[in-house]
Amino acid sequence: MTLRSITLHIRCASSVLGRFVNVRLEEEKPIFNKQRIDFSPPEKINHFAVCNNQLCMSLGKDTLLRIDLAKPDQPNQIELGRKDDSRVHKLFLDPTGSHLVISLSTSECLYLNRNTQKVRSLSRWRGHLIESVGWNKLLGTETNTGPILVGTSQGIIFEAEISASEGSLFNTNPDQYFKQVHSLEEDGRPAPVCCIEVERGPESKVVIIATTRKRLFQFVGRVAEGSEQQGFSSVFSQNQELLPSFQEFPFNMGYSEITFYTSKLRSCPKAFAWMMGNGVLYGQLDYIRPDSVLSDVQVWDYTPDIDFSFNKPISIVLTQFHFLLLLPDRVKAICTLNGQVVYEDVFPDKFGTLKKMIKDPAGGLVWIYTEKAVFRYHIQREARDVWQMYMSMNKFDLAKEYCRDRPECMDMVLAKEAEHCFQNKRYLESAKCYALTQNYFEEIALKFIEAKQDEALKEFLLKKLNHLKQSEKTQITLLVTWLTELYLNHLGLLESAEGKHGVFQETRDEFRKFLSSSKHKECLYNNRTTIYDLLASHGNVDDMVYFSVIMQDYERVISHHCQHDDYSAALEVLSKHCDEKLFYKFSPILMQHIPKKVVDAWIQMGSRLEPKKLIPALVNYSQMGSTQQVNETIRYMDVLGYLDQIYMNC
């Protein structure tokens, strides 16, 4: 099979996958969807690297295959030209997919830039078996790596820089410099630097994480803004006075691997997972912490079927909610929320032993290869079941965050949260949650009644009322009436209790706000007789007057003032609302007690009042014989000009 046919198969596989329609419900689609790339390599695959859609494979002894996955029909094959017994030890590809470092078993290194065909020697690196490279995500470009860190099999960490340009007459090497900045040990002896990562946090903070076989080191320092090009020496020097921060585990399986989860390309990782001898150490990354950036750390112990004598873990990849563990014949996916194995995929023997697993941060695809085959996993809707796990952990805010667009799931979370709060006697919080669920109204109300939690019941009814539609008139009427009764009961208890004046006033204000709600004005108006009866049965005169004003039931308000001999207040309401019929009705009694104010109000009303209809009040008061009443009657008639007419008639 030719290289061109290989890449055409890759492209066709991608195209077919893109056109394939899964008729099952979306919820039934597997999160981890494996696809075999349909080609057989002409030689054994030794090593594999992929980043930013740039794929590099080491084939056989001396061949390098490069494929731009955006243009898979344009493969690029390069011969390394090695005549000795050296073989490729590891491949390192930078985040841009531009710089490829080829570590050879003879402790030599080669360099290949994406835009060239020429393999160049990194002469300054000679004599060191390279195990890891920490790329510079801030300063790295397609032509220059910026300062990077390089870890060796002897525990030495070097700082280096590679340039793709041909250089000057006196310096044609791509490696600009190569200097030692630190070294790592285990048990007093040099230990291979299995992985190294460089990240930048806020306020010019630089975090370097390096792992050996059983230790995880952290170097935290600051690089002054504008001096990033000067490299990382200052970070290591800032840690010289103190022993470097590290975590150590007793078991050593000969190597370790650390992986990171980054939500957006070129942003700081949010989480990590370190595969080592005792299991997988995983957690979050918190760049605000002063010393260790690792937080919420947990250890996942290897399951009994992972036996180091014949199936040690090989690789690890971290996604948003899972880490994938590669074993010689299978892949396991473990949920980081609960530590459960949620997926296991066994590979047929015909493909051979699984060699390595790599995630391309650009597209999120996970790649696995054997000597004979290449596979990739598409991770689809990974967060779809996360809400259930958060719910089972009683992390309800997070559970709700991951089911916002799924009402049926949101309802389950709210119901569970409400029950959790109820069981823990947080009744008000429980009421607020229950009000948002579709649970039977009567059952929930009964729970609060049986628990004698009137405040929580009130909160539940209020929330439920606010979520009813205006068309649900019967339910609204029921809730409004019930709430009025609850408010009145509570006010009655507070009024008779000592030292509760402040709470009483707050509750009264809340009740009046409820009575004046514009949203439920129609319901309150249509059922005002019932509300009046409730107010009267509780002897709550003040709130009855308040409600009467809201309902514009001024006759009831004026009657109340008159019954309590507050005639000035009655006249004030009468004058404010200028209702002629009410003037005619209440003028007789008001004239008996405040004649001057009444006549002033009549005069103010002017032609809106018909004097003939005021005669009962005038005659009544004249017969009483009160001098003030008589005088005020004469004053009113004089204003109208009636006396002149009487004298003329006489």
Image (spheres, grey):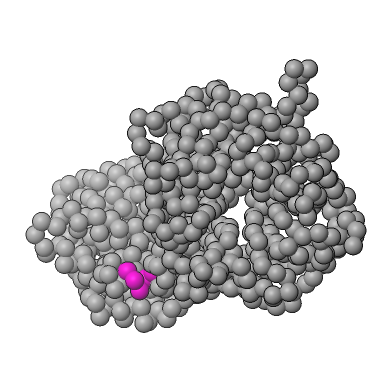
Magenta region, residue range = 417-421
> Residue 48 location in percent, x, y?
71, 53
Observer-nearest of 438 and 64: 64
Which secondary structure type mostly characterizes the magenta part of the structure? Answer: helix
| Residue 95 percent coordinates (x, y) | 66, 43
* Left or right side of 347 for 393: left
How many discs mark residues in the rendered view? 0
Q: Which residue is painted at 18% across and 67% down in the image?
A: 492
Can I make out residue 440 in this image? Answer: yes
- Write the residue at 84% across / 60% down: 42
Q: Residue furthest front?
A: 84
Queried whether the magenta region covers residue 419, the answer comes back as: yes
Quarter where residue 123 is shown? top right
Residue occupying the point 39% across, 30% down? 240
At which x and y percent is residue 172?
A: 76, 24
Task: Report the residue that reaches farthest toward the left.
Answer: 498
Q: Nearer the viewer, residue 569 or 406?
A: 406
Q: Residue 41 versus residue 494: which sits nearer the camera? A: 41
> Is residue 453 found left or right of 49 in the rendered image?
left
